[in-house]
Amino acid sequence: MPNARDLRSANRPDRERSPQIDEDVTGKELDRATQHQIKTLEGTSAEWVARHLVMAGRLLDEEPELAFQHALAASRRGGRLASVREAVGLTAYAAGHYGEALREFRTYRRISGSNMHLPVMADCERGLGRPDRALDMARSDEAKDLDAPGKVELAIVAAGARTDLGQLDAAVSELEIPQLDINRAFSYSPRLFRAYADALTAAGRAAEATKWQRQATVAENALGLGADEEPDIIDLGWDEEEEAREEERQRRLRAQEHADTHAGTEERAPRAAGAAAAAEATGAAAGVAGLDAGDELASDDGADDAEADYFESDDPESDLDSVESDVLDEADHEAEDEAEDEADDEAIAESDLELNDDADQELSADSERDQHESVED
């Protein structure tokens, strides 16, 4: 139904009226980037453009021709905006108007500087019966700057162009890109796997094609297509045994790091602290001697749950009992030796101080005698 409020079109007998906008459409349904561009327009025009863009997106899959008319209506007041020219190109492509779509995508690229729609432009060349130009786009410098999904789409278009030219083996080669990994699934993998399977079938390699068709289904199931959240990447080759081995390896690494940290802390502890711990151990040993047999058995039961390369008892008295008597004696001897060494150092320092004082007094007396003799002469 024509839009009765489209007065601009009503004043032009050679132009059809814009399509009617649904009452529930406000224009605020657009993404933030598109809304930011539309804000540069005058108030009434901004609302007009926004609402027609929403309608174009709503009808794109079900009624692409009507969606194209809504995009054209938006371009009449917002034709200088990149998002509007992009919408016209996408709806024209969906409706099969490849010439209009190619023109709009070129305008979008000129305004925005982006080559993101290069695969669709190449497919428009195919739609216009020019597969050679599509292959030229696939080999262009701009194609090298595409992201992974864009490279996959362009490879699929190039394979289709090869098929249009009757080059079936070359079509298979066009799809053998780094993103074609049978053991890993990305968002674009199911589509790439099926395109590769179709190319293999056309080239007479049905057995290989069956394998890739099956793997496309596996990839879809792994990605959970249709779910609210899809993972960016899933490794299809991962199994439970490998996961268990990885968990065991991580556990051993954590245990080793913990043991290294504990050993480093003990090495950095001063010897004075060791002597104090030894003294406490001596006192604790007397108290532990009175433990009954039931306590000893309880202490032994927990040892089987400990890791082989590192064990720390939950009973602090048991830890103190593990200090050898030779270690205690050695710690005491070291403390006594340090005290004696400090006393000797203080005695030597005092002796040196006294000698220095005597030498200073002798030098002072000699200086006074020399001055007295000089005066007498």
Image (cartoon, rainbow, N blue to C red):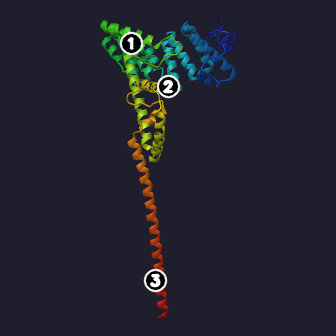
131 vs 66, left or right, is left
Crowdedness near tag 1: few (<14), some (14–19) or many (≥20) residues, C-alpha within 10 Å? many
Tell me if residue 19 comes above or below residue 28 in the rendering: above
Disc 1 designates what residue? 193
Which one is in front in this view, the residue at disc 2 or the one at disc 3?
3
Q: CA distance from mark 2 to mark 1?
A: 27 Å
The residue shown at (37%, 14%) is: 159
Circle number at residue 366: 3
Tell me if residue 137 comes above or below residue 93 in the rendering: below
Disc 2 designates what residue? 114
Q: Mark 2 vs mark 1: which is more N-terminal?
A: 2
Q: Quadrant of residue 129?
A: top left
Percent of width and height locating residue 229: 52, 16
Q: Mark 1 vs mark 3: which is more N-terminal?
A: 1
Crowdedness near tag 2: few (<14), some (14–19) or many (≥20) residues, C-alpha within 10 Å? some
Q: Mark 2 vs mark 3: which is more N-terminal?
A: 2
For the residue pair 121 and 322, the one nearer the viewer reads as: 322
Q: Amino acid at mark 2?
A: Ser
**Regarding mark 2 in the picture, which secondary structure is present there?**
loop
200 vs 340, left or right, is left
